[in-house]
Image (cartoon, grey):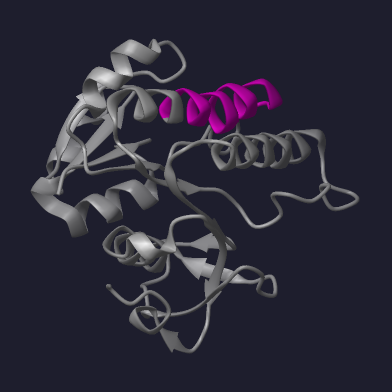
Amino acid sequence: MRIIIAGGHGKIALRLAERLKSGAVGLVRNPAHVPDVEATGAEAVVCDLEQATVDEVAGILRGADAVVFAAGAGPGSGAARKDTVDRAASVLLADAAERAGARRFIQISSMGAGKPPAPGRDEVWAAYIEAKTEAEEDLRSRDLAWTILRPGRLTDEPGTGLVRLAPEVPPGSVPRDDVAAVIVALLDNPGTAGQTLELVSGDTPIINFVATE
């Protein structure tokens, strides 16, 4: 399979690329990040989703079996980039996927999306949740085989392979290793299309939640 990963230098994306190896293509904004992506065994393509056109991105996606939106403005970015990356880049990637005929689309969102931001959170967090919510709403309106994954608080602890995965789960944390493993399982199971799933650490093996059909 040829899997395009937007936000290819992100912590989840690199872990996902390590699992997919030569089947992965990581899109990176900064050319300096190419060696890190290639070190996983994946291919790297320089593409700035804040600047690229739909046709440019569709050209990269043509022939892909699936697309994973793992991009994000990241810590320290302001409210404006939450919109241009977490929302607009996802919309652009979905537009390009439709144009290229790449129907399988996994969107990494966040727990909290789809609801008003929790009281007491700052304006940047509110902008982040709003951007994720709007990106989800856009994707649901499309004729794509989409799955939306909402992880809880992300950690860099080693993965356990044990999670809770359902349309709604209690708040919690989850290692990025396990998020990447769940994405692989989702890619292997087209029957998960049309679902929005929340993800935290738990006590059930990932394969029990997402069985290959």
Q: Is residue 25 visible?
A: yes
For the C terminus, the quadrant is: bottom left
Q: Residue at x 36, y 79 (%)?
A: 161
Of residue 174 and residue 149, the one placed in the foreground of this image is 149
Quadrant of the image occupied by residue 33:
top left
Of residue 94 and residue 178, the one placed in the foreground of this image is 94
- Name above or below for residue 159 compared with residue 106: below
Of residue 153 and residue 5, the one placed in the foreground of this image is 5
- Name above or below for residue 172 compared with residue 44: below
Specify the farthest residue to the right.
119
Q: Main secondary structure of the magenta part?
A: helix
Specify the farthest residue to the front.
143
Q: Is residue 8 visible?
A: no
Q: Residue at x 18, y 55 (%)?
A: 20
Position of residue 45 measured from the top left corner of the image (x, y, whole percent) = 20, 25
Write the start and end of the magenta stretch as one range: 77-93
- Name above or below for residue 40 compared with residue 181: above
- Name above or below for residue 74 compared with residue 46: below
